[in-house]
Image (cartoon, rainbow, N blue to C red):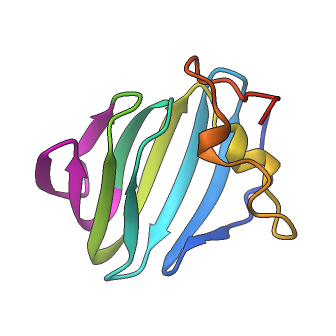
Amino acid sequence: MCADVVGEEASPGVVRSVLAYSDSIMAVENRFEKGAIGAMHSHPHTQITYILSGIFEFTIGQEKKIVQAGDSMLDISGVMHGCTCLESGTLLDVFTPMREDFILCTQDNPQAIRPDMYSSNGKLDENQ
């Protein structure tokens, strides 16, 4: 399914645009201003990040790494990760399965689906 490519502020200085998705995969573009932070977090999805432009300091688990255009990283399900943008740039994230929380949230109700609402298999727990 294709998404409307309309960016939304994911956090201060970060604009997230869902590019395309199906039940099993999702592509997301994240545009960062210099100094913007992707806060440390984890989720039940496996994520591949490709650096389209800019320079970032990424932390994945206990490892810190400076990355730039052309670099890529793998974030395994459940591992804490985050980044700081050192030079304005854009990341392309691919998630499996797709991030339901990115689709079900709206500007009117940004907390509609929270990461803690996922069960251990990556599916939304309807009872939360």
Residue extending farthest front: 127
- As for residue 72 lying within the magenta part, the answer is yes
Answer with left or right where residue 9 lies relative to residue 81.
right
Span of residues in magenta: 52-75
The main secondary structure of the magenta stretch is strand
Position of residue 44 relative to residue 9, above or below, is: above
Locate residue 93, reporting x and y percent: 47, 45
Locate residue 17, reporting x and y percent: 64, 58
Answer with left or right where residue 35 lies relative to residue 20.
left
Locate residue 22, reporting x and y percent: 72, 27
Q: What residue lies at 24% left-to-right and 49% top-to-bottom? A: 70
Quadrant of the image containing the N terminus: top right
Quadrant of the image containing the C terminus: top right
Q: What residue lies at 41% left-to-right and 80% top-to-bottom? A: 33
Position of residue 117 relative to residue 53, above or below, is: above
Res 8 → quadrant: bottom right
Position of residue 125 relative to residue 56, above or below, is: above
Label total for image = 0
Locate residue 66, reporting x and y percent: 13, 59
Q: Nearer the viewer, residue 13 or 82?
A: 82
Answer with left or right where residue 5 lies relative to residue 33.
right
Q: What residue lies at 73% left-to-right and 58% top-to-bottom? A: 5
Q: What residue lies at 27% left-to-right and 39% top-to-bottom? A: 73
- As for residue 66 lying within the magenta part, the answer is yes
Residue extending farthest right: 108
Res 101 → quadrant: top right
